[in-house]
Image: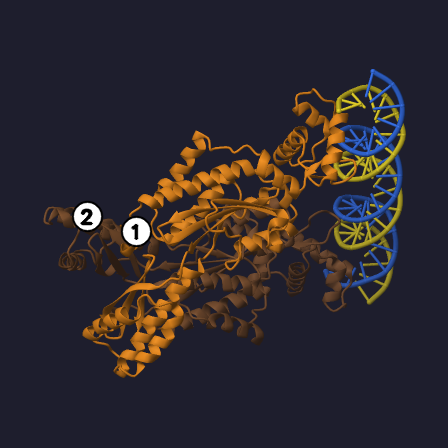
Chain colours: A orange, B brown, C blue, D yellow
Amino acid sequence: MELTARKKQILKVVTERYIDAAEPVGSKFIAQAMGGNLSSATIRNELADLTELGYLEQPHTSAGRVPSPKGYRLYVNELMERRSVSDQEAAAINEALGGKMQELDSVIAQAGQMVSSIVSYPAYAAAVGKGGVTVRRFDLLPVDAGSFIAVVMTADSRVKSRLLRTDLPVEAEQLSALANLLNTHFTGVEPEGMGEKLMALTGQLPPELFMPLSLAVEYAGEVMDQSAKSQVFAAGQTQLLLQPEFQDPGRANELMRLLTDQKAELPVLDENTPMQILIGPENVNEALKDASVVVASYDIGENMRGLIGVVGPTRMDYAAVAARLSYFAESLTKMFGKSNQLPPKEEDKS
Amino acid sequence: MELTARKKQILKVVTERYIDAAEPVGSKFIAQAMGGNLSSATIRNELADLTELGYLEQPHTSAGRVPSPKGYRLYVNELMERRSVSDQEAAAINEALGGKMQELDSVIAQAGQMVSSIVSYPAYAAAVGKGGVTVRRFDLLPVDAGSFIAVVMTADSRVKSRLLRTDLPVEAEQLSALANLLNTHFTGVEPEGMGEKLMALTGQLPPELFMPLSLAVEYAGEVMDQSAKSQVFAAGQTQLLLQPEFQDPGRANELMRLLTDQKAELPVLDENTPMQILIGPENVNEALKDASVVVASYDIGENMRGLIGVVGPTRMDYAAVAARLSYFAESLTKMFGKSNQLPPKEEDKS
DNA sequence: CTTTAGCACTCCTTTCCCTCGAGTGCTAAA
DNA sequence: TTTAGCACTCGAGGGAAAGGAGTGCTAAAG
């Protein structure tokens, strides 16, 4: 049972007006907004139908109408005009992206902040790997008798390093032998397999080399864990407090907590979907049940995707957010495409 | 003009009651709290004096009294019972500290989070170096023709690394020659001196080596910048929203913003002061004018101090926060003292 | 001189009630 | 199908009144 064109137009007017003004929309306003050819009474009949059908809601009997989640959904799917960003907005985004982007983590964190400031809602960002992470290469650099630097390069070309200390002194030659050992046995191995490998080598080593070896392996495990865990960075949480629906501190608090919590599980995007809009109850997460989320993804190298989401009230300006977010994501994809900061692994190159 | 003992006791009762109940304190309550030996009328006389002297304030004529900043100051300086943490609290802190602490930055960020959860107010953490940061050592590891890894170890024993790409291929031997060059000319140099040094070397190098050299130097500059800038990590911002004084979203917003802003300038501690309490208008920062901050510091190695601060309403529970924070800071100092993760530089060792 | 009982007074908070107005739903006519 | 008309609903806003916590002052008692 498709809605008539007129009903749809009314729904569109209601939704956009409500997004704009944050107050229930009355029949009189709608009649006017639709050109004044119809009387408010006619509109009221239509509104009654739309309410009956579940697209609109009434805060109380004598108030205007407000879109229900179902109404927003229809709006987003069919009614919303797919805006593209204005030249100004594009310029602003390009400028934001102009700065140099270096370590992957800080790129992601920055992306979150930029998006948040561009759309005026809180945003979160993360990177998800397509496959398991493994180490591509180890280096051990002697520092002094009791310490050395472990450098680990993962398959996705992140480089991490740490100073490690041993109880017993280790010679430089021994270190390079250890590095060889690591490169032979521990590259391309998933984190789970490492403990086993380590065990297997225990017997074959002079005892003073076991500690540095296990330290290095442990560190590698940590690095892989971190890469795999795809840390979520949130930004602009305070933007929420400016929205009228979050003036009630109780409500704001819940969402703020979600956004500030490091381990929060924020909506993730299916692979191959460029962008997704989750409205109110469509969210799995309890705290998001009466909020909306717009998520987009972009490509980072060949084995990873970046994820960037915007959180707002269900009343959020979907058209504007979607336009800016997708422009932003596309820009990022392009940027990574020609970037020389995070090259794909050599093996994958043509 | 010292206050009489009785006036002080009254101020103490008022302050503690107000901290506890968040409502103005009346003479009747005080009379009772002081043992019931005095009538509320007597107390009222004293209250009038204390108000006259500026230690107390009256929200309006017919309300009870509330401590003024000056009153809080006296309370903190003289009246507050220096609590030590309870066994339970100590246990909680020790447990929080039990996890492994690795990279300095994440230790600091975690410390902020822990403190925030321990004291139930937002907290921030940073590390400040005592002197300028310089690079202690460079390593360049060949990866493939067009890229190499730069490993930089700073004087304060932080190790950072990044994958760098060059336009022209560079041989492994050339890289190690470059590393030597870097170690000879760029160690112990302040960031400002680097550009100059780089210039001086330009002529003496085969042109294909200039790019990798300048990339490495640039990276070293970034690392030093980062270390010197002492990034501030904030945590637990949402705790603010639970405080009755921040139910007004406008007020909360300002402070939240301060705490969420990466570049925020939060109170820093003088060297050699173990802990400091800044009450309301004592804060330089405009947004903190009607909030209070408790800051403590702890030692990290020999050339750095960690800073950890708690932000709350002026009505915050100074005794509890101060006790927990100083216990926490002391624990951290101990931890770093015997830690083998971030050793002081060898040259400094006995 | 200090303390206290007594009491009028202030001013916030809560409650109740009233009005106002926006908006509705329904009916009956065009 | 559309529209005018109208009664009705319900929240928002605005006093007015009641209640109550707390004060400041006075005058007497210790």
**Gap between marks 1 and 2 measured at Cα:** 18 Å
Of the residues shown, which amino acid type is indicated by label 2?
Met
Residue B86 visible in the shown view: no
Question: Which residue in the structure is indicated by mark 2?
Answer: B211
In the rendered view, tell whether residue A1 sits above or below residue A226: above
- Residue plotted at (52% across, 34% down): A82
Q: Position of residue A215 (x, y in %)?
A: 33, 73
Q: Name the residue nearer the viewer: B163 or B226.
A: B163
- Residue plotted at (57% across, 52% down): A256
Quadrant where the N terminus of chain A is found in the figure: top right
Q: Are marks 1 and 2 in contact (CB under 8 Å)?
A: no
Q: Position of residue A157 (x, y in %)?
A: 32, 57
Q: Chain of mark 2?
A: B
Tell me if B235 is positioned left or right of A224 in this view. right
Q: Residues within 10 Å of mark 2 (few under 14, many from 20)?
A: some
Question: Which residue in the structure is indicated by mark 1?
Answer: A343
Tell me if B153 is positioned left or right of D20 in this view. left
Q: Chain of mark 1?
A: A
Of the residues shown, which amino acid type is indicated by label 1?
Pro
Q: Position of residue A23 (x, y in %)?
A: 68, 35
Q: Name the residue nearer the viewer: B303 or B94.
A: B94
Q: Secondary structure at mark 1?
A: loop
- Residue plotted at (77% across, 67% down): B36
Q: Which mark is residue B52?
A: none
- Of circles 1 and 2, the one toward us is 1
Tell me if B247 is positioned left or right of A234 in this view. right
What is the total number of numbered labels drawn onto the structure image?
A: 2
Q: Name the residue nearer the viewer: B308 or B157.
A: B157
Q: Position of residue A74 (x, y in %)?
A: 62, 39
In the rendered view, tell whether residue B238 sits above or below residue B94: above
